Image: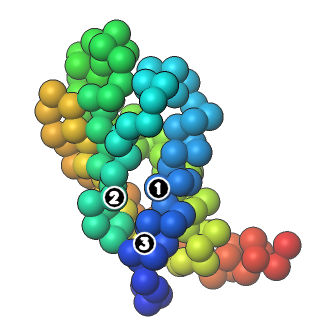
Amino acid sequence: MEEIDMGYYAIRTLLPAIMDWVDNSRIKKALPDHPCKFLTQLGNCSVQISLSYLSKEYLQKHVEPNFQRYCNAFTEQLKPVLRKWCIKCNMTEVRIDLRYTAHLVYGTSVHVIVSREELKNYHNV
């Protein structure tokens, strides 16, 4: 893994990249209009996703019936976002820990690996 200051990248680019995805997804309608801590950085490459900020109706319909399945589906939707973020940051490998909270807590990790050729192609365009 390349040596970089993950705190710098996580603070300045990781959370905004995920939030951009949230803002352009259907989940945005279930979030309050006022600013909230839906995403929080817990560590260098660790993010908490506070599902409790979602509307009560959304939680009851999508999250509460099977919390773990919802978290896994959310993670699958995030993988392309995390991969794109990794490429933009010129990283070949990173592990990102995701912690979901609501009526339960669930944690998982996403291991992103990008080939040097893919990085070269992206940055030489």
Specify the amino acid type for callout 1: Leu
Sequence-earlier tag: 2 or 1? 1
Please state, as top left, top right, bottom left or bottom right, where the N terminus lies in the image: bottom left
Residue 61 versus residue 116 in the image, above or below: above
Q: Is residue 85 left or right of residue 42?
A: right
Specify the amino acid type for callout 2: Gln
SS category of the residue bearing label 2: strand
Q: Is residue 13 left or right of residue 46?
A: right
Distance from Cα at disc 3 to Cα at disc 2: 16 Å
Q: Which mark is residue 15?
A: 1
Give percent across and percent down for residue 119. Answer: 67, 76
Mark 3 against mark 2, which lies toward the viewer? 2
Judging by the rendered image, the residue that carries numbered circle 2 is 41
Crowding at mark 2 (Cα within 10 Å: few <14, some 14-19, many 20+): some
Residue 54 versus residue 65 in the image, above or below: below
Give percent across and percent down for residue 104. Answer: 14, 33
Residue at 49% of width from left, 61% of height from top? 14
